[in-house]
Amino acid sequence: MRDYHRLLERQVRKLLPLEWADNAQLSSFLEAVNQSYIHFEDNRLLVERAMRLSSDELFEKNQKLQEESERQQSLLNALRKAINEVSTDPTTIDEVDLLHVAALLNDAIARRKQLEKDLVCARENAETALQTRLMFLTNVSHEIRTPINAISGMAAILDESDLSESQREYLKAIRSSAEGLMVIVSDILDVSKLESGKFSIEEIPFDLDKVIAPLIQSLSLRGEEKGLTIHLRRDPIVPQWLAGDPTRIRQVLLNLLTNAIKFTDKGDITLRVLQSGTKEDALMITFEVEDSGVGIEKDKLDFIFEQFAQEDITVTRKYGGTGLGLSISKSLVEMMGGELKVKSEKGKGSTFGFTLTLRPTVSRPTKGTPLFGAANLNGLEVLVVEDNELNRFLAITILKKWNARVQVAANGKEALQLLKKGKIDLVLLDIQMPVMDGLETIRRMRQELYLRIPVIGLSANAAQSERDYCLREGMDDYLSKPYRPEDLFECISRLCAGHLSLGPAEYGEGQSLYALDRLSDMYGGNHQHIQQTVKMFIDQMEGDRSRLISGLESRDFEAIRNIVHRMMPNLELFQVVGLYDDLELIRLHAGSRNLDFLSQKIPLVNEFLKKVNLQLSQNALNQPKR
């Protein structure tokens, strides 16, 4: 007999005869009954097991179920909140349906991602438009600056000739018109640079008097034409030497003073420079321009700082201008950490002022720049590479006036042919030219012809980025057009000092290469202290000379920068003439890893320092006590 559930088996043995045990139909029935017994037994065991669970176990399981329910409800609330935060449409969720919530949330996320993509695309389009506009304005600026350079330069040459009084008046009108046009072009370009983030502020030592004095001098002539007097009220406690951005400070003051002259018909204009406080190791320097002009309506005071804005249309008709000057000045002052403010009353004049935090610094050695026409290049062989006929004629005229021998090329290809043929001491290289531009020319000069002769880049693009790029490509210096003859001579003087008969004698013989006045003042004339410091200076310079050459040989550009940075304060203390600008150039070219320039300039600086140390050893260390 088959194995049945124990209860069924007992009944079968008790009630059924043995001969029925193998009956097929009965066996099927008994199997079905047997399965029922087994299922019943399993269910009974489950029920008994459930009944055996303690009340504590049931409470614990119920608590867990409740916590899970609360967690799901919290999740649902969080999902609802997330949907409401990312969705622009108000959504009400009545059902506790996670799938529905997830679908709504996914839809909201998809819409938000699309919005973000649209915003990115819009920003990229705006940036592209800004760059395109800046490029367009830069090109237009270049095309306008190029003829202005020729006009200004030829006017400067003409100004030195014998002219009648009426001719000088005509010449003054020409120069004034050229300057006015240059201001407009520069303002428009500056606005574009500010909008595209291409404007940068630097912090360098500068002579405050040399920023202010030329402004007062040049604008006083313009003021005298209207019967105005420009006064300077400079607080004597304001240091002469400060660290900041002299170019931008000059630009802001020029705008404010020019506006004061423009809107004042009678009376005085005053520029005040005051020390209004201190901040850690820096000074609070306040600049104010006060006039007795037409003044500004009270409700227009904020409006005047907006681009292309003037008080009203009658101002534009009467006084002219683009309305950009104050907007640019406000932006520049803010970039330098200040705020441009105005106080004004209609009919009683205006006062514009701003305060900058500037660090006092030590002075740097200055070099005299000879007057235009007084310089002598002693037969310096100069190659002028310029495609514009007027600018080419201007450069030739200036250089020949300085007794230079001049060769001319209209593009880089012609320049390379001339450079292959003969000796050239200096190249004036225009950047934008047909056939071969200046950048391609300098690359071939350095990499194919292996020429290390000095090259001065010339461009109507006044952007700092253009200057930096040209120096990185191998040029030794850079001038933006229109340039003054004095600026050109100073640039040449740094690169070709041996050919100059006037101006700074950087590596000359038979002259004192140092001065101990500052050292003597510092020690109150104590001879022993002076001699000890001189000896320390000589030892320090000997070490720095050696390290400078080693840095050049190992091409350790960072070491060269650090050595130059350490040398400069000591050279300032001893008033070593003729090295500061060269060291600045070495530092700059070390940053751009310009090995050609450094290989040419560092040995010259090394030789000059050797002469300085020799003079100090022979003279300063042997001076008798006073």
Image: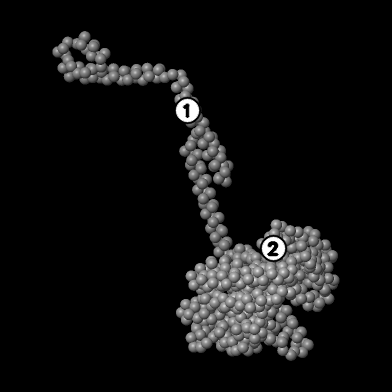
Q: Nearer the viewer, residue 313 or 537?
A: 537
Q: CA distance from mark 2 to mark 1?
A: 69 Å
In the picture, the quarter occupied by the N terminus is top left
Q: Residue at x 70, y 76 (%)?
A: 624
- Return the x and y of residue 355 as percentages of the image width and height: 73, 61
Q: Is residue 235 above or below residue 475?
A: above
The residue type indicated by label 1 comes to Lys
Which residue was labeled with disc 2? 359
- Return the x and y of residue 138 as percentages of the image width and height: 60, 72
The residue type indicated by label 2 comes to Arg
Which residue was labeled with disc 1? 64
In the picture, the quarter occupied by the C terminus is bottom right
- Return the x and y of residue 71 as percentages of the image width and height: 50, 33
Q: Is residue 232 above or below residue 375?
A: above
Kindly indicate the quadrant of the structure image that contains residue 316: bottom right
Kindly indicate the quadrant of the structure image that contains residue 289: bottom right
SS of the residue at dot 1?
Answer: helix
Residue occupying the far front of the picture: 624
